[in-house]
Image (cartoon, coloured by chain):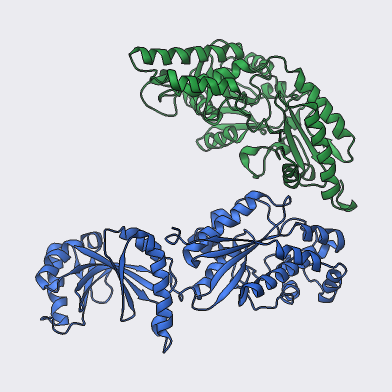
Amino acid sequence: MIYLDNAATTKPCDEAVQAAAQAARLCFGNPSSLHRMGIQSEKLINEAKSVILKRLGLQGELFFTSGATESNNLALRGAAQAYKRRGNKIITTAMEHPSVARTMDELEKEGFEIVRLSPKDCLEDFEAYMADSVDERTIMVSCMAVNNENGFKTDSERLYKLVKQKNKDTVVHTDGVQGFCKTALKGDLISLSAHKVHGFKGIGALYKSDNVRILPLVFGGGQQKNIRPGTEPVELVASFAAAVKAYPCDLSHFDELKNHLCERLSRLEDVYINSIENKSVPNIVSFSAMGVRSEIMLHALEEKEIFVSSGSACSKGRISSVPDAFGLKADRADSTLRVSFCMENTIEDTDKLAEEIENGILRFRRSKRCRA
Amino acid sequence: MNELIMAKYGEIALKGLNKGTFEDILLKNIRRRLRSLGKFQYMKKQSTIYIEPLEEVDLDEALRRLETVFGIGALQRAAVFEKDFEQIKTQGVPYLKEALENVRSFKVEAKRSDKAFAMKTPEIQNELGGAILEAYPHLSVDVHNPQVTVMCEIRDKGAYVSAMRITGAGGIPVGSSGKALLLLSGGIDSPVAGYMMAKRGLIVDGIHFVSPPYTSERALMKVESLCEKLTAYCGDIRFYCVPFTEIQEALRDNCPEEFFTIIMRRLMLEIANRIAQKNDYGALVTGESVGQVASQTLKAIQCTDAAARYPVFRPVIGMDKKEITQIARKIDTFDISTLPYEDCCTVFTPKHPKTRPDFDAVIKAEKSFDFEPLIKTAVENTTVKLFRVEGNKE
């Protein structure tokens, strides 16, 4: 089995599994309990927080959530509610994950002015292009650090600086799901997810810098400073931190894999790389084998025990807005495949993938008339 | 206080000498549907099946299941009393509370088949009506257009009081008209077509064509969940799954593109013919609707129809998408049908299909390649799966 769909989810690492098991066996107290068992759990959670904050390299608070969808909702709705008196303009992009895009749609219905910018309109300096739109009424800018479908990278440190130069009160939210552990992240609010870094599904976090305020979405017993009440899932939190700790810092292996795969693919006729050169992370490669629909190639690879994605697995076949945000034509979008690596993948894996892509093209590409 | 369900016949009531056959099939279908809920006693009388629980049973659930049984015109839930008018009055009137508290008008309809009962029909109506008016003073009697009709029947075995009447599924009992094979694609129309033919008493089984890797595991799962849904109306469904990849590839490589869909449909019908013959089906059913897509124009239907050796029933042929969708929502297949997975019909869809294909040209194109060995293999490798109706699973 060759698993090349790590942007969809990753296999939990041994460290994460062990940490969860150990917490479940030994540290099952309720962190809010007054006795020692509770204090133990609370300590575990605080340790986990500092591990994750250290990896982020940021000072501030961390709230654990059920995952990135909740983190994004909490960040966007929470900040919009907190700052709605200051203004009602929110700037975002046309390439966001549905958990941001749909939340923006809802905020728009509630009366906020949502500006959605497309990377295709200013690929050479998208950060500056976004910051340009910021004015005194802009309460928030939200942008993903790494696009889940093609690996496009936005420099969140630079974006943060440029936005603050225009308006120091504008809150910057960074969807850091695909970027966490892979690239530097900066923002007043940053959404994180454990299962993209070899942790478990069902646990994520929202980072918040000390100088911004958000309001909660749910109400309850006061846990996590009332921003995200509910008993903290100690086991999942512990495993999240263990996964982050275990995630390697030297990611040059991704570059090797990507370069090798791209070189192999470049030998094939009518195969185009969609990931933008020098502006993408090395662990995600999007390409199109023209004339073969993504789903067909995906299932053909599946028959050979190779697992990739056709765009984003979260939307299961529904049409994504991402290709359009990058100006990809329909026929190219139709045949898009996304390969996403983990550190365990090997050069041989990419060779095998390239071979099977070639076989797939021979089998599926319709006669000449369908070639691009 | 005991309750029972009365299932009143729909169309069967109009049948002549063969009425008994229909009744027997309906009774069998009802028994099968309720079996897992508990023990019931069944009695047929005067175009009604009396379904009396012999133990503690969830009657709401029983009614829910019976609502999708074809052959039932209406369902009534009634309380059972001794044939003692005092008891009928003192216990029957409170029993009616739920049905009467939010309406304004009612009437009482009595039936007395036990002529030994001391009161006559009008007398029962008057007395019971009076007691109801006294208990629920907000009501008034309206004998022409009552919002609720309270029924009181004095039968041999007891007295029944009821105010709850649900419209049944109608039609005639599944199994009273023979067996047909439904071509299920996964779209909106074919499950509706299956539902409609089951309503006319046909046993409907499904046939579906898969083309991995062109079609996904999820597309098949989707069609299987459609079958599962249809069992509520159709009863047990046998599901034939035909491996179709090789045929589609041969088609792509050997036939002109504009005829892909037409020839594909002809080949599907050919395979359906053989499976029908092998398993004793009397007809094929499709979800075609004239003019909906290129393969459903008159000319195209002529081409595909000619490949069938059985009558092809197309119950939605004259319906709009909107009407079909309404039924799909009613039978709860719409949300499954609209899941976005590629199915066998859309693989290799030509960019410009012929909307008015010439019959001879199609036949000529089809003959240019020998599909026979591939058809044989496909039929041989067809798998069968049985979907059982709720209640008949254990």
x 25%, y 59%: residue? B102
Residue B256 image-quadrant placement: bottom right
Position of the C terminus of chain B by quadrant: bottom left
What x and y, as percent, mark residue B209?
68, 60
Residue A99 lies left or right of residue B290; in this view the side is left
Residue most extreme to the bottom: B17
Residue B265 lies left or right of residue A192; in this view the side is right
What x and y, as percent, mark residue A322?
70, 36
Q: Which chain is green?
A: A
What x and y, as percent, mark residue B111?
22, 79
Viewer-side residue, A176 vs A362:
A362
Residue B95, compared with residue A264, is above or below; it is: below
Chain B on-screen colour: blue
Viewer-side residue, B369 vs B326:
B369
x 70%, y 38%: residue? A309
Residue A129, compared with residue B188, is above or below; it is: above
Q: Is residue B92 visible?
A: yes
Residue A164, compared with residue A192, is above or below; it is: above
Q: Is residue B72 visible?
A: no
Position of the N terminus of chain B by quadrant: bottom left
x 84%, y 38%: residue? A355
User: How many numbered callouts?
Assistant: 0
Viewer-side residue, A27 vs A132:
A27
What x and y, as percent, mark residue B240?
63, 63
Viewer-side residue, B132 vs B103:
B132
